[in-house]
Image (tube, coloured by chain):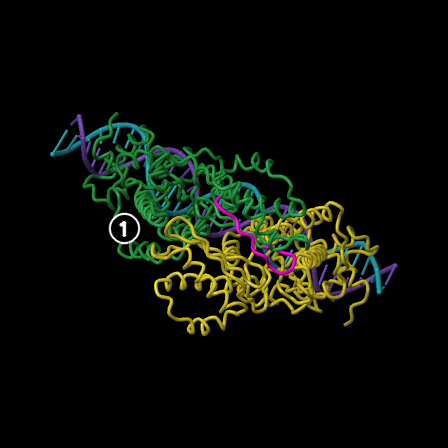
Chain colours: A yellow, B green, C cyan, D purple
Amino acid sequence: MQMDERKQKVLCAIIRDYVSTAEPVGSRTIARKYNFGVSPATIRNEMSDLEELGFIEQPYTSAGRIPSDRGYRYFVDCLMEREQLGEQEAGLIHHVFNNLEEVNGLFQQVTDLLSRLTNYTAVMLSPRIGNPTFQQIQLIPYQTDKAIAVVITSVGTVESKLLNIPEVITSDDLAWVAYLINNNLHGMPLYQLRSVIRLIQNLGESKVLFDQAVGLIDRALKAQANEKVYLGGVLNIFNQPEFKDVEKIRTLLGILEEHQIVRTLLNETSEEGLCIKIGTENRHQGIRDCSMISATYKIDGEVVGVIGILGPTRMEYSKAVTVVENLTENLSKTLNKHYNR
Amino acid sequence: MQMDERKQKVLCAIIRDYVSTAEPVGSRTIARKYNFGVSPATIRNEMSDLEELGFIEQPYTSAGRIPSDRGYRYFVDCLMEREQLGEQEAGLIHHVFNNLEEVNGLFQQVTDLLSRLTNYTAVMLSPRIGNPTFQQIQLIPYQTDKAIAVVITSVGTVESKLLNIPEVITSDDLAWVAYLINNNLHGMPLYQLRSVIRLIQNLGESKVLFDQAVGLIDRALKAQANEKVYLGGVLNIFNQPEFKDVEKIRTLLGILEEHQIVRTLLNETSEEGLCIKIGTENRHQGIRDCSMISATYKIDGEVVGVIGILGPTRMEYSKAVTVVENLTENLSKTLNKHYNR
DNA sequence: GTTAGCACTCGTTAGAGACGAGTGCTAACA
DNA sequence: TGTTAGCACTCGTCTCTAACGAGTGCTAAC
């Protein structure tokens, strides 16, 4: 059996109706509401065919039809048209990207924006930069027995910590340790750090200080390697009638709380561009009745991170895709400008 | 009517039973399960009195009794005995406070610990330190047209930011601006900052840099003034049968997500020591069927922050109070040691 | 190929009755 | 005076049934 134009139109109508009502769609509704100019009986025949093709299904005999995962897939691949952003939405986006104070805040802002524009839950991974290296450390004396250590990595992130140091350590010692570290470890990636450190000896009293400082460098580089997870609009889950069940919500919130799971999910995004996973296409058991739309963003032409949304399979794919694509573009542009490459 | 000893025992038994089962408690259950040595009929008479006193109530005619907010209040004020911590629990607490890596991580750890020990949702405000002042700034050159600014406040917190600066600015300019700021603004609280800044003139090309640096100082001091909110065990809400209703969960999660609300709630904690708010004693409409147990922690004898738990009014008050008190003590001790006063 | 007609399915809703946990009251008892 | 057995009564919960209706598939006619 082939998909002719009318079948496609019927499938579109079913999806459109189901997406907005969350109720199984009957032949009468389709025929009347979407002006097919044929009777419900004719639509029924088409629906019967669509069911045979696996694009729609019946929750039970003699209920209306709902789109199957395969139906959504066909719709997304072959039928869906990109939607235009409304003026208000474009305005919101413009506002976020053009009133940027600093990059770190941007990630949360973009995630919130994404959830707000789509009404689904938004997730995001901050940029993972291939092999960040140690750049420099500063040790600043503070009160009598403390020091503040500030580590800068090659990607411009800063990690700092208040150190407790033995009283015998002078500010000259601080300077000496900082000099030692900067001289010997500059430009080191994480995996080389340990082996080089072993070569540095004879620190005497400064050993404690040195160890703490190196620990911080370690953390700074590790933090960079592990992409941070941002969540936005988590409560949007409650808007979906398919999640009126407490257990379902609990499962989903449990997944979102486990950042490692979110990371895995997002990292399954195809290497470049947009990725849509519908229902059972998702690996993770707990989101088998959800769809995820994600897209990668780049710095200097290289993929560094992902943003995405998580919603029910009954999702406004067209709108969602437009927003996700738009935001990744803007994000890439902004980050490139910021990192000046 | 007076509360005699048996009435108190009956109230205790009702609360104890209701807390563990979440079902209205009948006279038979009380008489049998709690070895009163009298018949259900006698218990019924006592219950009737307790109801008249307002300590228990019936959900409907001829159901069992449940404790009223007033009943819980009487129990907490007059009847409750402190519970001892189990060995395993004490071990967990010891582990967190004695394997401390750094103070900033401690806050989230304590919040998580609190929720884990009680099985309720834990909330916490990070220390608010009265009038933090600007201590010092470092401007570190980075790449050709950037600088990393690091601001240290009087309480040892560090704020940093990557600055974009005009190309004409040299590293000497950076040093000069840092010197200027350190010399003129050192020891300034937030409210004096602006007026002093106006006195500094003739910055020429460095104006942009100067403004960005001051902006960061501003933010660092403001961040300190506004206590940060930490949440732990949010999903514990789902364990409570009283929250099997989706709308209730949504409301509660909505409140927890609005950090400003949480801040207000916690700041209503009595100036010192423990605070228990039961049901309608809570100001906020959305948690009128919850109880909150909170306690302040101190640095240098001065109250600086609050930790607390939020659960259903049907709460294990004894256990919860013990844990909250224990953690505030440990927290105060640890912070004092860390800040060395 | 399209459509009206019609029997049929099956989830949803509303109502009725049985059930049972628990009460309050009364009267008897120590 | 406090305690208790007995008993009628209340009311939420559970189960069963019947009515309803949205929607289907099939058939036959156009």
- Image coordinates for residue B308, horizontal then vertical, percent: 39, 43
Q: Give residue B4's quadrant in the image.
A: top left
Q: Camera-side residue: A197 or A11?
A: A197
Question: Most prominent secondary structure in the magenta stretch?
Answer: strand
Residue B193 appearing in the image: yes
Q: Amino acid at mark 1?
A: Leu
| Label 1, residues with CA under 10 Å away: few <14, some 14-19, many ≥20 | some
What residue sits right under mark 1 in the picture?
Answer: B85
Q: Is residue A48 above or below residue B107?
A: below
Q: Camera-side residue: B333 or B142?
A: B142
Left or right for A118, reference D18: right
Left or right for A117, reference A197: right
Q: Quadrant of the C terminus of chain B?
A: top left
Q: Camera-side residue: B266 or A147?
A: A147
Q: Give residue A170's quadrant in the image.
A: bottom left
Q: How many marks?
A: 1
Please check the rendered image and state whether residue B141 is part of the magenta-colored stretch, yes or no.
yes
Please check the rendered image and state whether residue B270 is part of the magenta-colored stretch, yes or no.
no
- Image coordinates for residue B112, horizontal then vertical, percent: 41, 52
Residue drawn at 78 percent across, 68 percent down: A3
Q: Camera-side residue: B197 or A266?
A: B197
Residue A320 appearing in the image: no
- Image coordinates for residue D18, horizontal then vertical, percent: 57, 48
Q: Is residue B327 above or below residue D4?
A: below
Q: Which residues are magenta?
A: B135-147
- Image coordinates for residue A250, horizontal then vertical, percent: 50, 54
Q: Quadrant of the N terminus of chain B?
A: top left
Give the secondary structure at mark 1. loop
* Chain under numbered label 1: B
